[in-house]
């Protein structure tokens, strides 16, 4: 049974209502665009009143503790509050591929994935749709949903928004994209990224603690962090792993990701115009190990 199943229904509804109220002058994420999304005005994320979904499907390419034997039930949300020049899902995040869905329809997707055997419901890029997701969770609970929810974000999250999810989401899987603000601004248009990301991850860890895995190797609760290695050390790995080991927990489950390849606008940046090599990846893993991290490295 997931955490949200133990929350009184009236509290769950109240959380959704509070979140929806913040759409009137949207401040869900650190950009705080201030547009009235209840009237379908759009800010940086190019999103209005209702959620937009690109696809929903069992996914077997996620981290092993999420996939288990039956897959992670991923729901790919359209739009993003980041502007990564190398985004591998740019057709969804930047070009807006997807369709608008009602809370009831989103709830049906969640239940469909769970009924199909998925170990969890994994919201990919949920930051700008927290109110709509909470609306859907209210409906999904009525339909019998009981699997854990995964918050799979770029790490550019507001602590105030994350607090609305306390006791609802069991698994947080944020990116820790950068260890320096200069790289974050240049490659993801994300001012003050490192401070914001660190505060968000600390709040996520406060809520759920280190990743807990059951006897079947499936994650049931906790924090799992992703860090994508970029060419020439541009992601600032040393500072990311120092923060995780020293300020979060040496038990932090970290996926040091090797799959960077140039996408979208990456070829406009010579330093990003090639995949990483084996040496760069091995060095990143070694830096994480030296910092004291050991769980999940090199998945």
Image (cartoon, rainbow, N blue to C red):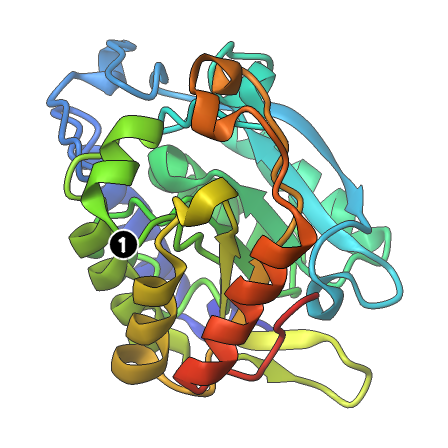
Choose top left, top right, bottom left or bottom right for residue 99. Answer: top right
Residue 132 image offset from top left, x and y in percent: 41, 35
Residue at image location 82% in from the left, 53% down from the top: 115
Residue 177 image offset from top left, x and y in percent: 40, 48
Residue at image location 66% in from the left, 64% down from the top: 147
In screen coordinates, is 295 left or right of 179?
right
Residue 61 visible to an observer of this rendering = yes
Say which of 34 and 167 sits in front. Answer: 34
Choose top left, top right, bottom left or bottom right for residue 49. Answer: top left
Q: Which residue is mark 1?
A: 197
Say which of 24 and 271 sits in front. Answer: 271
Choose top left, top right, bottom left or bottom right for residue 159. Answer: bottom left
Residue at image location 24% in from the left, 10% down from the top: 39
Say which of 281 and 158 sits in front. Answer: 281
In screen coordinates, is 113 left or right of 182?
right
Residue 235 image offset from top left, x and y in percent: 39, 48
Residue 79 visible to an observer of this rendering = no
Q: Quadrant of the C terminus?
A: bottom right
Q: Quadrant of the N terminus?
A: bottom right
Residue at image location 53% in from the left, 69% down from the top: 254
In screen coordinates, is 250 left or right of 217?
left
Residue 106 image offset from top left, x and y in percent: 59, 34
């Amino acid at each position: 049974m997931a955490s949200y199943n133990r929350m009184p229904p009236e509290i769950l509804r109240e959380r959704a209502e509070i979140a929806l109220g913040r759409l009137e002058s949207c401040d869900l994420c650190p950009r705080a665009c201030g547009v009235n999304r209840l009237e379908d005005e759009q800010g940086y994320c190019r999103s209005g009143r209702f959620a937009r979904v690109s696809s929903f499907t069992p996914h077997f390419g996620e981290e092993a503790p999420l996939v288990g034997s039956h897959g992670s039930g991923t729901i790919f949300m359209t739009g993003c509050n980041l502007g990564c020049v190398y985004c591998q899902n740019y057709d969804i995040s930047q070009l807006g591929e997807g369709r608008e869905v009602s809370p009831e329809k989103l709830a049906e997707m969640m239940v469909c994935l769970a009924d199909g055997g998925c170990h969890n419901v994994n919201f990919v890029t949920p930051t700008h749709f927290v109110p709509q997701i909470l609306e859907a969770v209210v409906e999904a609970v009525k339909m019998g949903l009981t699997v854990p929810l995964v918050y799979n974000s770029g790490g550019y999250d507001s602590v105030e928004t994350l607090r609305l999810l306390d006791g609802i989401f069991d698994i947080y899987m944020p990116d820790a994209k950068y260890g320096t603000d200069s790289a974050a601004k240049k490659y993801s248009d994300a001012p003050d990224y490192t401070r914001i990301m660190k505060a968000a991850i600390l709040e996520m860890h406060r809520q759920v603690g280190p990743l807990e895995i059951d006897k079947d190797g499936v994650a049931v609760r906790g924090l799992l962090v992703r860090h994508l290695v970029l060419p020439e050390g541009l992601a600032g790995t040393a500072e990311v792993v120092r923060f995780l080991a020293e300020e979060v927990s040496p038990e932090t489950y970290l996926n040091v990701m090797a799959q960077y390849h140039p996408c979208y606008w990456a070829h406009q940046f010579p330093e990003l115009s090639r995949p990483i090599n084996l040496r760069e990846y091995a060095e990143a893993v070694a830096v994480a190990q030296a910092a004291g991290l050991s769980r999940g490295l090199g998945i």
